[in-house]
Structures are given as structure tokens and as C-alpha cells.
Image (spheres, rainbow, N blue to C red):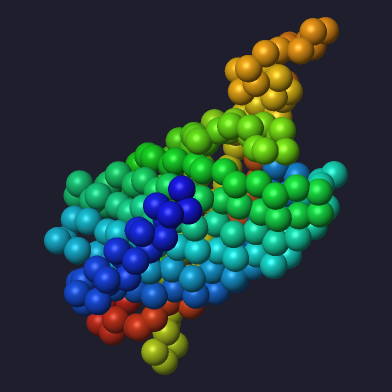
Amino acid sequence: MKNLIASLVLAVMLFATAAHAQTRVLAGVTGAQEFDNSSLGVTAALEIPFLKHYELDLKDTFSPMESHVALGGGRANIASVGGFVWLSKSIGLTGHVDDSSYNVTKITKDADYAFGGLAYRGVIGGLPARFTLSYIRQFNNGVTPSGLESSHLQGIDFGYTVRFGCLGAVCIRQSADYVVGRILEQGNEACDGSLPVIAPNVYCGPRISAVGGGVNASILVEFPRHRATEQDVF
């Protein structure tokens, strides 16, 4: 998955050099409290509109401050590739794929997630904004060499981003995502078919499910400032 993300990053960077003049660069800070885990880090992103109805997005969030309950602290990174298809001026489809990894005191893990759903954009109270409602599905699950099985997440993500105003050559955005989902907790690797023979006296009961959620929020600087259009929908 990391090779795929790297290839997509290169493709997007090359595409951005010849993309629509409204390409937006974003940078800022992101904090999260999700599923009993917390993080604080920095975000960089590209938004590349093209052919009037399409947008290609690339984002990376690196968190040098990552904390997981019962697993300790460390660092994390989320690389994301996705975009929008606008069916009209206000309504569209959205989707992206995230490669999420973390390295904390007791464990190192990598997980992949797919998001897909509906998008709305408009001017709310004089502020350009967009909203998304997406279904989340974790994929590429499996058992690590250490014997730890990935949790399986299915859920809903509600997100928004608002351009609050501009000053000089930049604009300021605030964005957030609210997530709720069902997780199948990490199980016994002897029970999922990854081992050739199930050892005697091993009980393979159902995986324990739990419902959780949380929020991640960002304050971002958007540049360059596209004067005369900063109050338009984006």
C-alpha cells in the first residue's frame, strides 16, 4: 500500500504542475481524539480542481505526538489520496483512500481505509464551505508477523471545511471530521486461517465488537490567495 501511495503522490505532484490555475496548497496543525486515541501533528495538502467538475486531493498528516490507551505513545502518519466529482454547482460525490500507520511503545501497525459518499458545497453565513458524509471501510486486514490481527472498522464520517477569511496572500480554513463506527477488536491469529493448523484446546469464539468514535480538527493556511474568487464556493 505504501508503494501505491508513493506512486500516487508522485503522479499528483507532476499533475499539479500543469493543473487548473485554482490549485490550492494547504498547511497547518491537526489534533484528534478518536477511539480512545489522541494525536497532535502537522498537515500538508493539495487541492487540484480540473475540467470544471473534478478535483484531485492529496493530504498527509504527520503526528509526532501520538498516544494509544494501553499501548503507549509515539508517532503516526496518515497519507490520503482522493477527490470530488461535482454533479452540479452544489452537490457531488467524494471518496479517498487513507494509509494510516503508527509506531508507539508496544506496537507498530499499518491500516488502510476507504471512504466514499456525498458532498455539498455552498456559502453559509457569507463563508464558503463544503460538507461530506461518507461510509468508512477498513480493508487489507490481516495478521502481522508478531501475531497481532488488525481490527476491522466500519462506520460513518461527517466532515466539513470552512474558509473563514483572507489576509494578505493567504486564507484561513477550519476543518473537522466526526467519526462513529463499529470495530471488531483484535483477535487470536490461530482462529482466522492464517496458521496451517489450529492448535488443540484453542477456543475460537467470535471477535468482540465495540462502538466508538471521535473527532479530528485542523486549522489550515490556504495559499496562494485567489483574489476575486475567495468568497466563491470551492
Farthest residue toward the front? 196
Is 44 left or right of 121, judged from the image as shown? right
Q: Residue at (38%, 63%) from the top-left corner?
A: 9
Q: Position of residue 3 (x, y in %)?
A: 43, 54
| Front residue (pair 21, 73) | 73
Residue 214, quarter of the rendered image = top right
| Front residue (pair 207, 109) | 109
| Front residue (pair 126, 50) | 50
- In this view of the protein, can residue 218 be seen by the observer? no
Q: Position of residue 107 (x, y in %)?
A: 75, 47
Where does the C terminus fall, quadrant-wise?
bottom left
Is 4 left or right of 150, judged from the image as shown? left
Residue 116, quarter of the rendered image = top left
Against 150, is 88 above or below?
below
Against 150, is 104 above or below?
below
Farthest residue toward the left? 51
Against 1, is 184 above or below?
above
Q: Residue at (70%, 42%) from the top-left corner?
A: 35
Q: How many marks?
A: 0
Against 183, is 89 above or below?
below
Q: Residue at (42%, 77%) from the top-left corner?
A: 222
Q: Position of residue 81 (x, y in %)?
A: 39, 55
Farthest residue toward the top? 201
Is 147 left or right of 171, judged from the image as shown? right
- In this view of the protein, can residue 199 be seen by the observer? yes
Q: Position of residue 170 (x, y in %)?
A: 42, 84
Q: Residue at (65%, 46%) from the top-left corner?
A: 109
